[in-house]
Image (cartoon, rainbow, N blue to C red):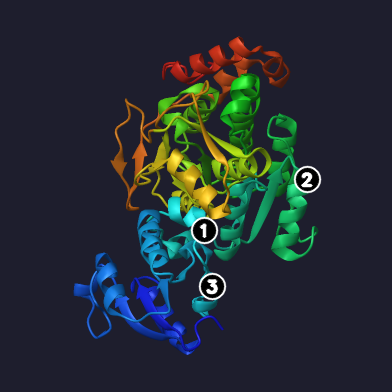
Amino acid sequence: MIYEGRRVLLIGYGVLGSELLVDLENAGAVVVAILDDRHLEISGESRLKGAVSALGDVLDQGDFDLLVIGASLISARRINWVTRHARNRNLPVYLAPERSEIESMENLSEATRTPEIEDLFARSSLVVDRELISEVVDGRRVLVTGAGGSIGRKTVQQLVRHGAGSVGLLDRDDCLLHDLAVELSGSMFDRRFPLLHVDVQHRDQVLRAFETFRPELVVHAAALKHVATLEADPANAVAVNVLGTAHVLEAAAAVDVDLLVNVSTDKAASRIGSLGVSKYVAERMTVGEGHDGFRSVRFGNVLGSRGSVLHTFRLQAEHHGKVEVRGDSTTRFFMTGGEAASLVLSTFTQKAADGTFVFRMGDPVQILQLAQAVLDDMSSDADIHLTDLEAGEALHEQLFGNDEKPEDTAIPEVFRVEVPALSREVVVKEIGGLRTAASLDKEDAHSLLVSMADWPVSMVSDQ
């Protein structure tokens, strides 16, 4: 066993730390000292040696075999800092799982693992009310579009943990659906997880799927998300991100869905490029339904997801001996897939209110620094090649539009912004259907997106 007879310095006592402490000792560890930023508030624990900032002094004065980061809410920056201190002293570091990943508080020590790149750059301090999520989700029929994607898959997994009665898995990729179903239950024929092989571009397919499954809650995560592909052909942004969302909203209204969360992106705040503009139009249409249970959630990049910058850097280094970074000062906001899914489900728990919910994600990450960390992790000697920004890209992302005023919510660091309503009927009528959308050339498609994003609130009805 990892911990048998090992002298451990435990970082973080709260949330998971106290349970983890007991479990480490049961696993044979000798917990010599504990550091916690709330040390002055904790009594009865003589091994507390101060705040986490005292790490360097404690390591110099003590004799440790390894460090365990036991606070599941510790930020990526702090994990990075602790890890650097440990590496300088050749001490291994183990990390408690994210709260969203924990199925049982038993055997926590077995769930610890070495930190990965995602932990060093994307882990945040999102606090969610797991019990409240369970109250909303327990026993309900929930449909997830884009279920096979990175956020969709994590959301489905968490829905199962929170006791959802059944989860409809909707995706246009039958292989991803197959793999997810087998992962969840070992079978493709489990009635708790009906497979809905549907492309949201196709209205009739979406309406039929909703009529068959009749969900009570919906997470709309199906979307095209890559800037480069959508800039190359903005018609796809119109067809999938706009028309697809309109179809989902129509189907949800037709079967009286109670709560719907439209998964958006921080790029909707700046409305730069086809991705950002199309997702902003989707946010506006969600408000345009006039249903206070229909809302959007906006956050930054999910590090480690399919096609993410992390995946791209690894492929570039492995196959081409270099990684491309858009400028030496470009930054992005990141979070982990588990945190993204937790934020999505937390949006269900918000009191009746439409609009868009935004997680203040902490400090943005410098992409050049991330690229170097990836190469270090791979022990790669690949070069870093600096390039200019491409169309649709911004030097820095923003979470709120210049005209948006964030309001506090019941969730710490999660804010709500008003988004002007836009009728999906007006949007669909203007586009003219999927065949018309698919035939739009690059300039016409982008112009249409920009015009819809700027349409006045008065255009909320085709009557």
**Residue that carries the numbered disc 2 in the rendered image:** 174
**Relative to the observer, which residue lies in front, 441 or 281?**
441
- Amino acid found under the numbered disc labelled 2: Asp
Q: Nearer the viewer, mark 1 or mark 3?
A: 1
Category of crowding for the residue at label 2, using alpha-carbon neighbours closer than 10 angstroms: few (below 14), some (14–19), many (at least 20): some
Mark nearer the N terminus (1 vs 2): 1
**Relative to the observer, which residue lies in front, 131 or 46?**
46
Find the residue positioned furthest to the left. 40
Q: CA distance from mark 1 to mark 2?
A: 30 Å
**Relative to the observer, which residue lies in front, 164 or 30?**
30
Q: Nearer the viewer, mark 1 or mark 2?
A: 1
Q: Is residue 256 rendered to the left or right of residue 187?
A: left
Q: Position of residue 45 (x, y in %)?
A: 26, 84
Secondary structure under tag 2 reads: helix
Q: Is residue 365 rendered to the left or right of residue 54?
A: right
Q: Position of residue 61 (x, y in %)?
A: 27, 78
Secondary structure under tag 1 reads: loop
Using the rendered view, name the quadrant where residue 269 is placed: top left
Numbered label attached to residue 116: 1
Category of crowding for the residue at label 1, using alpha-carbon neighbours closer than 10 angstroms: few (below 14), some (14–19), many (at least 20): few
Secondary structure under tag 3 reads: helix
Q: CA distance from mark 2 to mark 3?
A: 31 Å
**Number of numbered discs:** 3
Q: Residue at x 32, y 53 (%)?
A: 412
Q: Are marks 1 and 3 in contact (CB under 8 Å)?
A: no
* Residue 253 seen in render: yes
**Residue that carries the numbered disc 3 in the rendered image:** 111
Find the residue positioned furthest to the front. 381
Q: Position of residue 438 (x, y in %)?
A: 70, 19
**Relative to the observer, which residue lies in front, 282 or 401?**
401
- Amino acid found under the numbered disc labelled 3: Ala
